[in-house]
Amino acid sequence: MVSGFRQSVKRHPTRGFVSVAVILSLSLSIFIPGGAHAQQKEAPAGQAGDASKASVKRDVQAKDEEDDAVTSESEQRELEASEDPLAASQARREVDRAKDKPAVKERTTGFDLYGSLRVRYREQQGDSSWQDGGSRAGINFDWQFRDGAYFFARYEFGFNLLTGIENLGSGKEGSEDFEDSIFTRLRYVGLDIPGFTAVVGKNWSTYYEVSGLTDRFMSTGGSASGTYNAQTDGGPTGPGRADNVIQSKLSTDFLPRKYFKPFDVNVQLQKGNPIPFGDGVEYEGGFGLSAIMTTQKDFTIGLAYNHAIVDLEKNPSLRDIGIKGDARAAIIGTRGFGERWYAGLILARLENHDTTDEGIYFDGWGSELYAQYQFLDRWWLVGGYNRLEPDSGQDRAGDYRVRYAVAELRFTFKDFSRMVFANIRFDDSRNADGTSGGNVYTIGVRWDLSKHGWHYSNIKN
């Protein structure tokens, strides 16, 4: 199957993207309501009672669907805690669709500006300093062109707040210093209609739909799932903030609605990108798949697979950095949460996917555990574990391993969007040469700024 896909990519590099466009066009014709309206007929007198019962049944079903779409406080908290802003936007649109009334149709167009300031003070082996902690800002655009149907776009950039201030104070104005301080995190356009979403650009991956279940520590974590592989943001290979992708998401209700929320299937196609540490060699293309099942009690289980094609025959030098074939990452994950708690667990299998600190690829297993509990108003205890180790026989990986536990305390001003935190990473990791970095002590602040924007509403009676 992989060899067949490889040949298809070589002979017809745009076939996958054309196929997605065809599917998208068909989906538009299926999901978006047309202009024709069915005529209503008056029911015979003998069927009036049955019609009344049917109407009540429809009203109850509509009410149930609206209740399912409305996010609870705990759901909203976890959406805000997620790194993926598109997930929160999609949840909001689902609520808007459920609240639509037949008599009043409201369509909106507009944009929102948002930002998050994140700084930390970190100490490790006697060395301490103030550091940037993942600050970012962005703009999100929405156009509701039909009832329940949206075009959207987002650009989000990360900025190193302290580095920028330091460069400004020292008078540095070089382009390299500017690029080091500001960089692109997300850049995409998309379509969202009932049951279907399509995205093109740089976005959180289909793989992250599962690996993100445990990527929730502040200023640490996410080291063992293969998300940020080969010392990158996961962009080139595709498991993190994937570069140059076409993604689609299909949500279906084939499972009993009384027990399950819509079942999500996600597909990702990726253009070839440079292989990290590959000296300019590029992947021959890639793809990703994931499937997510969530119960009405907010218990989730998900599977994901990410694959990037490597042509060793054309680029035998890749063997020098440990690559023996295509980059493959498979993951299974689960989570559950309630008003005062959250727990997530993932297990990942990685082949030719991640690297040691020296840039040597290896095969191995990774696992992550994350848990949190609110023991007092605004106070949260957080803990977990990350472990990634090469298989036995991976001699070129040396003594490399990721192995650490995290204990964290948070005080929240507004859920997890505004808080101060302190954590300890009890680190037993090693570099390939056997050296270790020791425990890491961190205090920090995350402060999400209030959204500001402009929206135009068009109400039709």
Image (spheres, rainbow, N blue to C red):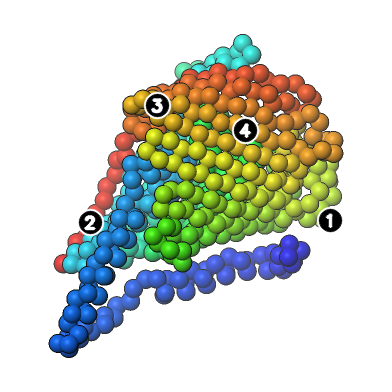
The residue that disc 1 covers is 313
Task: Give the numbered dot on residue 457.
Answer: 2
Q: Secondary structure at mark 3?
A: strand
Residue mark closest to the camera, 2 vs 4: 4
In space, the residues marked 4 and 1 are separated at their CA atoms by 35 Å
Asked whether, in this view, residue 165 is left or right of residue 13, the answer is: left
Is disc 2 placed on a helix, strand or loop? strand
Measure how far apart labels 3 and 1 are at the Cα level.
57 Å
Q: Which residue is mark 3?
A: 375
Observer-nearest residue: 401 or 281?
401
For mark 4, what is the residue? Answer: 386
Q: What separation in Å lies between label 2 and label 1 (alpha carbons)?
A: 57 Å
Label 3 crowd bin: few (<14), some (14–19), many (20+), radius 10 Å: few
Give the quadrant of residue 368.
top right
At horizontal 78% and vertical 55% (from top left) the residue drawn is 311
* Quarter of the image where the C terminus is located: bottom left
Q: Type of residue at label 2? A: Ser
Q: Nearer the viewer, mark 2 or mark 3?
A: 3
- The type of residue carrying mark 1 is Glu
Specify few, some or many for label 2: CA neighbours under 10 Å numbering under 14, 14-19, or 20 or more.
few
